Amino acid sequence: MKNQRGVGLMEVLVSLVILAIAVLGFAALQFRALDAVQEANDRTTAMTLARDLAEKIRVNRTQLSKYKSEINTPGNATTKNCIRADSSDASITNTPMCTQVEMAIFDAGQILGVAKQKNMTVIINDCQGGDRQCVYVAWGDTTITATSQANCMVEGVYVAGAKCLVMEAYGS
């Protein structure tokens, strides 16, 4: 009996070590799940921004070049407050109509404002490997500019680990 003294305590300690390892593994899984949820939210926001911009351009399709210049180099023109006729804002009455160019500037400003709030970058540029236009949206550590989307895509292939989305939108 004297030789058996303390064996139970050792069994409990070994069990606690095994339990601690299991709890740490579970905690690591929870952190990975939170990262995955954040990435999914970012991708959803980026897709919504790109789709919204593509639809606004589709409505005002003759101004693709204006949208492209305003998105890629914002702040070049004075923005007129253009509220669409289907606006649900009841406080806005007798809003002057906007020209197609003014509407493009207004739409681009709205998209860029939302992108800035979400810490995202939006660019319209030629799609790689074709004569189409693409909407590029990047976030996190991925940076893109009007002249280089190399941190996002290279020769039509996504860069590993890049946090960006590319939506093919229009033919030139």
Image: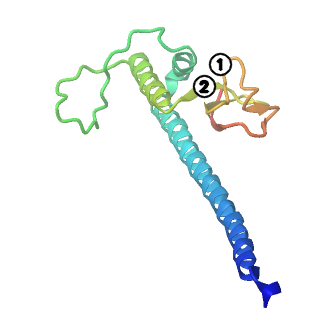
Residue 123 disc label? 2
Gap in Å between the C-alphas at discs 2 and 1? 6 Å
Q: Residue furthest front?
A: 2
- Which of 126 and 25 lies nearest the eye of the viewer? 25
Few, some or many residues within 10 Å of mark 1 (<14, 14–19, 20+): some
Could you say which quadrant of the image residue 7 lies in? Answer: bottom right
Q: Quick check: 77 above or below 152?
A: above
- Which of 6 and 120 lies nearest the eye of the viewer? 6
Q: Amino acid at mark 1?
A: Ala
Q: Amino acid at mark 2?
A: Ile
Few, some or many residues within 10 Å of mark 2 (<14, 14–19, 20+): many
Provide the residue designation for mark 1. Answer: 146
Q: What is the quadrant of the N terminus in the image?
A: bottom right
Q: Mark 2 or mark 1: name the one nearer the start of the chain.
A: 2
Label 1: which secondary element = loop
- Contact between marks 2 and 1 (CB within 8 A): the answer is yes
Q: Quick check: 95 above or below 160?
A: above
Q: Residue at 74%, 28% (x, y): give it.
A: 151
Label 2: which secondary element = strand
Give percent across and percent down for residue 134: 65, 31
